[in-house]
């Protein structure tokens, strides 16, 4: 593998929405994104989602082991369809994340995937950051910085990812590099789709509010909304800061007496309000907010966000990017940085003490060698 020039890297992401595995290739040298390559998606089955949900909030044990098997199988299936990847970035499935205890767990063994796929795999991206005092999340900001350059941004902008948890990356593209002090500020803003998804599953047996239909049909309960946004200490904490998918679970209790539509609309409004509070904590107002993740497919939620922000809000597709695959691309990008000894997080992205590179590299044959010892 070249140590300086661009290579084709393959990244995979299984996010907190538990929908499936995204996989994408990019051509990069770990600094610049030169080209986007093939993509693929492998949905989790209903039974696999049940297994994954059973592991949420847990660090080990039978449920986590079962989730790891699901994750490894799904990743092996989708990643085996790609050719000519010099390196693979594998995030795994987060089952629990407690940054205040310097503890995080992503189910799935990258060393096993290296054997199955016969390619080097970079994984365990979060541990190094947390050992040095970081939150371990979010990890996509360095890639967001590269994308801001790729799309030609000239002034501060925000990449807003609305997955199970919502997070933002404030970027000053005029800075020399993502490690440069003041170049990035990144943090979780609050719930993304998780609270709505859980309500849809519990009440209606559905995975999500498809196309935001219930959000649009409901009426926001202003008193409950004000209560949800006023009481959370998290909103007053200085960023960087991060969350677990199941934080804010009491939001669902707060809307328990509302109709399905009104409950979903109120949860969506709270998500939008939390995002607005996050934007207010940025160093200066952004010129543009680019939205990625599943939340961008909820038109009513997007309208709520746009009504609260003082800048244009648009899906990343309007900048020529792929919002479905951006997180997977990010781990391809980060894998190259890890392989080349470059940092993947900094004080402004995770509160780590100094820029640090995360991840370990597993190469084919390593497990066989260990077995033979």
Image (cartoon, rainbow, N blue to C red):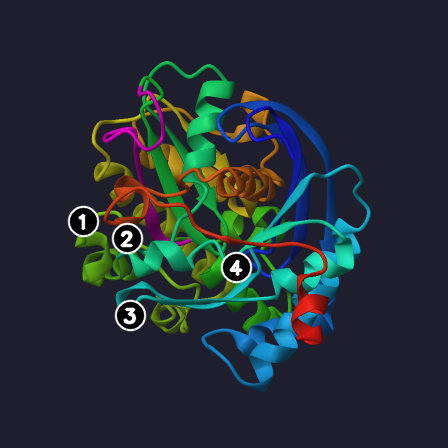
- Residue 314 has which mark? none
Q: Quickly name the residue at label 4.
A: 16
Q: Is residue 128 left or right of residue 52?
A: left
**Which residue is rendered at x = 48% and y = 27% of the image?**
31
Quadrant location, the N terminus: top right
Residue 270 shows up from this direction: no
Picture coordinates of residue 224 (x, y %)?
A: 29, 62
Q: CA distance from mark 3 to mark 1?
A: 18 Å
Measured in 3D between alpha carbons, the distance from the residue under mark 1 to the one under mark 4, in whole angstroms, is 24 Å
Q: Are the two marked residues, 3 and 4, in contact with CB atoms closer than 8 angstroms?
A: no
| Disc 2: which residue | 241
Compare residues 254 and 164 and report the one nearer the observer. Answer: 164
Q: Which residue is mark 1?
A: 238
Which tag, 1 or 4, sits closer to the chain's start?
4
Quarter assignment of residue 326:
top right
Front position in the image: 42 or 272: 42
Q: Where does the magenta region start and end?
A: 175-191
The answer for how far apart the CA atoms under marks 2 and 1 are is 7 Å
Q: CA distance from mark 4 to mark 2?
A: 17 Å
């Amino acid at each position: 593998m070249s140590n300086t020039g661009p290579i084709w890297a393959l990244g995979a992401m299984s996010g907190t929405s538990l929908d499936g595995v995204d996989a994408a290739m990019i051509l990069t040298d770990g600094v610049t994104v030169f080209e986007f390559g093939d993509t693929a998606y492998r949905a989790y089955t209903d039974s696999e989602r049940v297994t994954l949900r059973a592991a949420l909030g847990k660090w080990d044990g039978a449920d986590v082991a079962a989730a790891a098997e699901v994750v490894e199988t799904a990743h092996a299936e989708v990643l085996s369809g790609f050719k000519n990847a010099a390196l693979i970035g594998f995030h795994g499935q987060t089952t629990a994340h407690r940054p205040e205890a310097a503890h995080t767990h992503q189910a799935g063994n990258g060393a096993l995937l290296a054997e199955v796929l016969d390619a080097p795999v970079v994984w365990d991206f979060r541990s190094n950051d947390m050992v040095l005092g970081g939150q371990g999340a979010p990890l996509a900001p360095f890639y967001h910085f590269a994308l801001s350059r790729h799309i030609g941004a000239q002034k501060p902008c925000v990449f807003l990812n609305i997955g199970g948890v919502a997070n933002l990356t404030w970027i000053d593209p005029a800075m020399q590099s993502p490690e440069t002090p003041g170049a990035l500020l990144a943090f979780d803003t609050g719930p993304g789709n998780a609270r709505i998804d859980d309500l849809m599953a519990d009440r209606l047996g559905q995975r999500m509010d498809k196309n935001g239909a219930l959000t649009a049909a409901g009426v926001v309960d202003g008193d409950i909304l004000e209560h949800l946004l006023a009481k959370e200490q998290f909103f007053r904490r200085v960023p960087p800061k991060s969350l677990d998918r199941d934080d804010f679970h009491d939001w669902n209790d707060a809307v328990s007496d509302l109709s399905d539509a009104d409950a979903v609309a109120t949860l969506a409004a709270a998500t939008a309000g939390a995002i607005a509070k996050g934007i207010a904590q940025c160093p200066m107002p952004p010129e543009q907010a680019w939205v990625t993740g599943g939340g961008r497919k909820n038109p009513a939620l997007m309208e709520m966000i746009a009504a609260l922000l003082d800048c244009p809000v648009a899906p990343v597709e309007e900048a020529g990017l792929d919002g479905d695959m951006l997180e997977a691309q990010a781990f391809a990008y980060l894998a190259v940085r890890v392989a080349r000894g470059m940092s993947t997080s900094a004080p402004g992205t995770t509160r780590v003490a100094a820029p640090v590179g995360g991840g370990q590299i597993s190469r084919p044959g390593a497990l066989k060698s260990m077995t033979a010892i």
